């Protein structure tokens, strides 16, 4: 059973940058797609970014394209989310998650669904002030 722990959340001014990290333990994540979701106060959790198990494909929420970058380090068993040019609307709790199926190779529609992922971290708070 894999456990996921997010870190790196903080209070930052609009226009600033943060790097979130998700550390996995219990088993390797090298064969699993990984994703970041977020949940703002009073809103449903939404997809932010995903990376395929090979690392060769990445997917992003339209509003973060060009500002956020997801990456993985299978040696360290981690997945990072580099966030730049942060906006107040990026304020949320950010969660990482691991795919239910190993070595999945599907279209974008598969990776943006919450139901694709079966293990979630506890979340890390990102607050962007104006």
Image: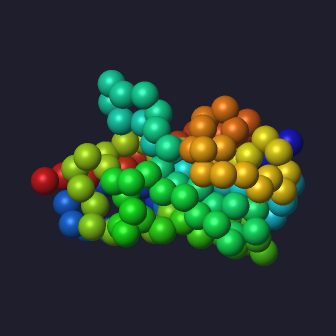
Residue 114 at x, y percent in the picture = 61, 35
Q: Is residue 18 visible?
A: no
* Left or right: 97 in relation to 59: right
Nearest the camera: 116 or 81?
A: 116
Q: Is residue 123 above or below residue 77?
A: above
Classify residue 87 by image quadrant. Answer: bottom left
Residue 54 at x, y percent in the picture = 76, 68
| The residue positioned farthest toward the front in the image shown | 107
Residue 36 at x, y percent in the picture = 55, 50
Q: Is residue 120 above or below residue 78?
A: above
* Left or right: 8 in relation to 89: right
**Image point (28%, 61%), residue name:** 86
* Left or right: 25 in relation to 39: right
| The residue positioned farthest toward the left in the image shown | 130
Classify residue 80 by image quadrant. Answer: bottom right
**Image point (59%, 69%), residue name:** 71
């Amino acid at each position: 059973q894999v456990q996921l722990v997010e870190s790196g959340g903080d209070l930052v001014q609009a226009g600033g940058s943060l790097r979130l990290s998700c550390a996995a333990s219990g088993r390797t994540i090298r064969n699993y797609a990984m994703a970041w979701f977020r949940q703002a106060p009073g809103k449903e959790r939404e997809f932010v970014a995903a990376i395929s198990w090979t690392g060769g494909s990445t997917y992003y929420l339209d509003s973060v394209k060009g500002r956020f970058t997801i990456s993985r380090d299978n040696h360290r068993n981690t997945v990072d989310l580099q966030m730049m040019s942060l906006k107040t609307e990026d304020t949320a709790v950010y969660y990482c998650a691991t795919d239910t199926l190993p070595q999945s190779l599907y279209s974008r529609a598969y990776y943006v669904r919450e139901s694709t992922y079966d293990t979630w971290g506890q979340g890390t708070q990102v607050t962007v002030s104006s």
